Amino acid sequence: MMDWLSLLLPAWIMGTLLVFLTAPLGCLMLWRRMSFFADTMAHGTLLGVAIAGAMSLPLWLGVSFIAVLLVAVLWVLYDPRLPNDALLALCSATLLCSGLLFIQHLPGLRPELLSYLFGDLLTISWSDLPTFAIVIIVALTVLYKSWQAQIQIAIDQDMAISEGVNAKWQRLIFMLLLALFTVLALRAVGSLLMGALLVIPALTARLLANSPKQMVVWAFVVAQIGVTVGLWSSAGLNTSTGLTIVLTMSLLFAAIFCIQKFKKLS
Amino acid sequence: MSQQSLSTSPLIQLSKIWVNIDERDILKAIDFSLQEKEIVTLIGPNGAGKSTLIKVMLGIIKPKSGEIKTSRKLKFSYVPQKFNPSHSLPLRVKDLLALEKCPADIKAEIIRDTGIAKLKNSKVQQLSGGERQRVLLARALLRQPDILVLDEPMQGLDIQSEAELYEYVRSLPEKYGCAILMVSHDLQWVMQGTNRVVCLNKHICCSGLPESVQQHPEYQAIFGTNRVFYQHHHDHCAHGDSATPCQHDPRPHIHPEPEA
C-alpha cells in the first residue's frame, strides 16, 4: 500500500497542478475556436522529442523548439484562400508523421514510443515537482494578466482592438502558453491525448456555466475529478493512466450531457 | 471659455488616408477630423467605405498611407454593425457590462437610460436586434469614452425606440462629454441630430452643416433632389418632433420594447 502511494502521489500532485493551467487555457481555447491549433501543437511535441533525442538535448528544449517553430510557421502561412482549420490539419498530420518516422529510426527512443504518444504519469518523481510548480505559477500569472484582454477578444475582436487591446500580441501570448502546456503535459498524457485534457473539461463546463468565470471553475472541477478518479482507478484496474484519465473525463461529459437532455425531455 | 480653445484643435485628425483592399481602392485621400463633443454623421451609398473609415480611425484597419493625429491619448468606444460572439462563450449581459470599470452611480444611470435593467441576466447571444443595440450602447458608454463610434445603431429598432435612441444619443455629448461619430442611412437623423454631415463615396464628396450638404450636387447625385427634408425646430419641450412625451422622467432615455 505504501509503495502504491509513493508511486502515485507525485503523479497525482503533478496532474492536480496541471489542471490549474488546463482549466482556463481550455476555456479560452474553446472561446477563441483554437482547439485545432492546440491539437496540432500537441502532435508536434513528438517531433520535438525526436529532435531532442537525436541531438541528445533535454526533451523540453526540443518540444519548445517545435512549438515556437509551429507558431512561426502558422504566422507565415496566413492566406485568406486557405481556411485556418484545414491548414492546421495539414500541419498536424505532417508533424505527427515526421515525428513517428524519426522516432522509429532512433533505437534509443523506440521503446519509449508508447509513453510519448499516450504519456506515463507514473514516471513522475518528487524531484520533478518543484520546477513544475514554478512553471505553472509563472504561466498562470501571465494568463491572469492578459485574461481581460483575452475575454474581450473572444467577445469581439474588432471591438477589443478599437478599445486598445493589442490582438496580435495577445494571440502570441496565448499560443506561447499553449506551447508551454504541451511541454508540461507531454510526460503526463502524451502527444495524442493532451488536446483532450484541454477540450473535454472545457466542453463539459460549457454545459454547466452561465458566465466565463463559472466555466473556468467547472472546467477545473471536471478536470480535477478526471485526473483524480482516472489516476487512482488506473492503478486499481492496472490500465494506462493517460487513457483512463481521458476516458473518465469523457464519461463525465457524456453523463452531464445525457442528464441535461433527459431533463429537457421530461 | 476653455471649451472654445479646445474646439480649435480637433480631438482626432485623419489626413490623406488611402485604404486599398485586394488592389481595390476603398478610401481615397480622406481628410477627416472630429472636435470635442461634436456629433458627426457619415452617410453614403453601400460600399462607400463608411465602415472602413470608422475602422481606420479605431485602429482596426491600417491604411496604406496617410496620417492620424490625436490631441491626446483617446479612449474610444465602438458599437459595431455586426456583433455575434461565439455560443461557446457563456456570457450574460451583466458579465459583459462588468468588464468595464465605471463608478456605480453613472453605471446605474446608463443602465436606466438605455432601458436594459431587465436584460441583466439574459444571454448576450439571445438578445433581439433592438435589445442588442441598447446593451452595446450601454457597454460603450460605461467606458466613458472620448469618442463614441456607432455603426448603424438603428438596426432592429422599431420606430418608437429609434426616435428615443436619437434623442438619447443627441444628449450624450453634453451629459458625458464625448464626441460622437455615427454611420447612418437615416436622413432624418442626419438633418435633425447632427452638427456636421460627411458624405462619403470612397472619397469625401462634401461635408458641412446638414442644410448646406443637401444643396451639394454630389450629394444630390447620390441621394436625389426630390426628397422632402425634415426641418428641425428645437421645440424639445413640446416633444412634438420626436418621441412621445414621457411622464415619469424628463431626461432622454430609451424604453424597452413591450414584452411579448
Image: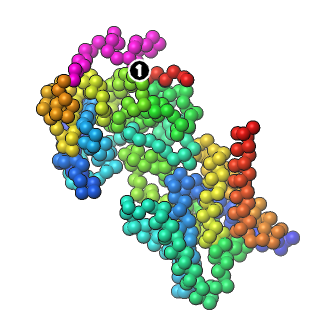
Determine which quarter of the picture holds residue B227: top left
Determine which quarter of the picture holds residue A261: top right
The quadrant of the image that shows the N terminus of chain B is: top left
B255 or B214: nearer the eye? B214
Residue found 64% across the figure and 57% down from its top: A200
Horizontal and vertical percent position of residue B167: 35, 22
Residue found 58% across the figure and 80% down from its top: A100
Determine which quarter of the picture holds residue B46: top left
Which residue has dot 1 on it? B160
Horizontal and vertical percent position of residue A9: 76, 67
Horizontal and vertical percent position of residue B131: 48, 31
Q: For the residue marked with disc 1, what is the amino acid?
A: Gln
User: Left or right: B11 with respect to A229?
Assistant: left
Residue placed furthest toward the right: A1
Q: How is the image coloured?
A: rainbow
Placement of B47 over or under A187, stated as above or below: above
User: Left or right: A105 with respect to A8?
Assistant: left
Q: Secondary structure at mark 1?
A: helix
Residue found 71% across the figure and 68% down from its top: A243
Residue B229 located within the stretch drawn in magenta = yes
The quadrant of the image that shows the C terminus of chain B is: top right
B152 or B181: nearer the eye? B152
Q: Which portion, as a residue range, is magenta?
A: B227-253
Residue A223 located within the stretch drawn in magenta = no
Placement of B235 over or under A137, stated as above or below: above
Is residue B71 among what the camera can see? no
Residue found 50% across the figure and 75% down from its top: A94
Q: Dot 1: within a 10 Å radius of its alpha carbon, few (fewer than 14), some, or many (20 or more) residues?
A: some
